[in-house]
Amino acid sequence: MEKIKIYISIILISGILFFSTGCNDYLDRDPLDGFTDDTYWTSEANVKTYAWLFYDQFKAYGIATGTTAEFYFQSSNMTSSINISDDLTSNTFLPYQLNPGSSNSDWKDLYEYIRRANVMFARIPDVPMEPEAAEHWEGVARFFRSLSYYKLVQRFGDVPYYDKVVDDPNDAENIYIPRMDRNEVMEKVWADITRAVDILREEDEANSVTKYVALALQARIGLYEGTYRKYHQAGGGTAFLQGAKEAANALITSGKYAIQMSSDGFKAVYNSEDLGGNSEIILYKNYSLGILANSIQAYTNTSTVGNGMTKAAFESYVCVDGLPISQSPLYQGDETLENAMATRDPRLLATVDSEGVSFQGSVSSLSRARKSSTGYVIHLYYNENSANVTTTGQSTIDASVFSYAEVLLNYAEACAELGNITQNDLDISVNILRNRAGITPLTYVSDEVVMVDGVTIHDPKRTSALEQISGVVPFIIWEIRRDRRTELMTWNAIRYYDLMRWKKGDYLDYTNNPDVALGVKGSALAPEDVATLNEEGYVYAYPESHRTFNPEKNYLNAIPTGQIDLYVAEEISFPQNPGW
């Protein structure tokens, strides 16, 4: 959405639409309050205005001083969102939620978006506009309905599926429908996004949903579902992986997007005041002072102790020769921050500040009084030319929603998971990103033999005890996952569900993966700093706390008990998720 669209959307839509608050109110409320169907659904312009509301579901960097976001921030309210990460350790300890909550904002909000989409479907045939326009707006509705159900399935698994508006509040048969098997829901999601790709305009207003945005979502959904079914033994994943590959390839061959190859191209995705002219951004959230702003720069550039990069994430970056730190002769060890960052992937230097280490127990902090939970200070979002770097609610850097880099990574992973990846596949995807970063490109010999500059990569972490829990993957998949993590570092909403689809929830468990609870090496601290170190000398972010991932429970959120109670009141069974 353009800046002015955001403002108009807030004023007009909030005035004409009724937002429900109960768990099931969305099923029995007419969304038009102040306008009737006859007086509102009269033009394409009104349909467009109605559709602007859908864009609010892109949380991006959050709104004002809020921290409900898709990047960097981590939620302390596990009933509303899960942004626990193995890349970042929060400035406050985050355990997994133990018991179901009575409500869940994701459940409520996503079903509201679904109802809006279904209302749009129902009204479009009666709006006087050209058939091409009607198809486009149907495509917009299908895009957002598919996105909403996709997110619901990620979070809750089996969910009720509604594809039409229920206008009668007494129509219990169509309101209190049972949970549909997640695989069936995802088949419907796939049908929606496929149809959207077919009928959406190739060009529309700037920064709005088009065929190309839909292809980016289709690639994301296909990769998620294909790998989820593979690693969770849910069956039928190959078709989704093939669909992901084809959608990503359609974007690649379209020639509409390109990776910015400049030295600051990677960081520009995360700290730009205007992503509108960035050739690798497919859709973004536009922030503007006085209309819609965020706080991501303020929270990462002031005395507030920030979320710090974990030891696990820090050590995942290769050296510039493309080899892991356990193998590269260039690696200088981690006795000091300078040594640890020397000769490393420049994307690490763009993400973590090389000025020094600083955490809550440090006697001094970095410039702008910055500290982090682990000592590794995130400065990916810093833009020295921004006007309000240290003021909460005043940050105006834009946030990516769909990026070409993600599309390239989706393509490479889908090819590898299908078992038919080639050197050309790597060269048009991951290796473009590595070239931009100045990292030696990957050479594919076989799924188990991947090389850089004639040297076969050997990373002992690939077969570690942690990996053995849910299964070791081939080297080609291991390296593609590494590049995905590096390129999308701090994009928590993507990383978390990457772990869920790969069945790698154990990465988040402090016992199985102790490095996720650790930070810098103690030798990098000042002598007077106060820190608790483990037996190997690394900083414990929260020495008194312990996080456990329960694989029988934590791959899905709890169904909100208030929703279950609504069904029980109607004497209808609505089962809770396993383990809850």
Image: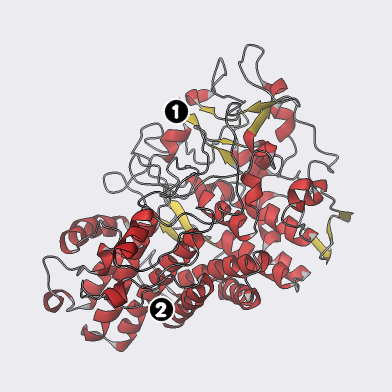
Crowding near the residue tagged with mark 2, few <14, some 14–19, many ≥20 C-alpha atoms within 10 Å? many
User: Which quarter of the rendered picture does the N terminus lie within?
Assistant: bottom left
Q: In screen coordinates, is 14 left or right of 93? A: left
Q: Earlier in the sequence, mark 2 or mark 1?
A: 2
Instruction: Report which residue position mark 1 lands on.
Output: 302
Provide the secondary structure element on which disc 2 rests. loop
Q: CA distance from mark 2 to mark 1?
A: 43 Å
Picture coordinates of residue 230 (x, y %)?
67, 68
Q: Is residue 385 visible?
A: no
In the picture, residue 277 is in which quadrant? bottom left
Give, as a three-letter code, the residue at label 1.
Thr
Give, as a three-letter code, the residue at label 2.
Leu
Q: In screen coordinates, is 449 left or right of 406? A: right
Colour treatment of the image: secondary structure
Q: In screen coordinates, is 13 left or right of 150? A: left
Crowding near the residue tagged with mark 1, few <14, some 14–19, many ≥20 C-alpha atoms within 10 Å? some
In the picture, residue 299 is in which quadrant? top left
Picture coordinates of residue 274 (x, y %)?
42, 51
Provide the secondary structure element on which disc 1 rests. loop
214 or 169, which is in the foreground?
A: 169
In the picture, residue 2 is in which quadrant? bottom left
Picture coordinates of residue 436 (x, y %)?
66, 53
Picture coordinates of residue 508 (x, y %)?
62, 45
Going 38% across and 78% down the picture, which residue do you hit?
139
Q: Is residue 482 visible?
A: yes
- In this rendering, the answer to whether 214 lies above or below 131 is above
Going 35% across and 64% down the picture, which residue do you hit?
111
Going 25% across and 74% down the picture, which residue do you hit?
47
298 or 431, which is in the foreground?
A: 298
Q: Which mark is residue 200?
A: 2
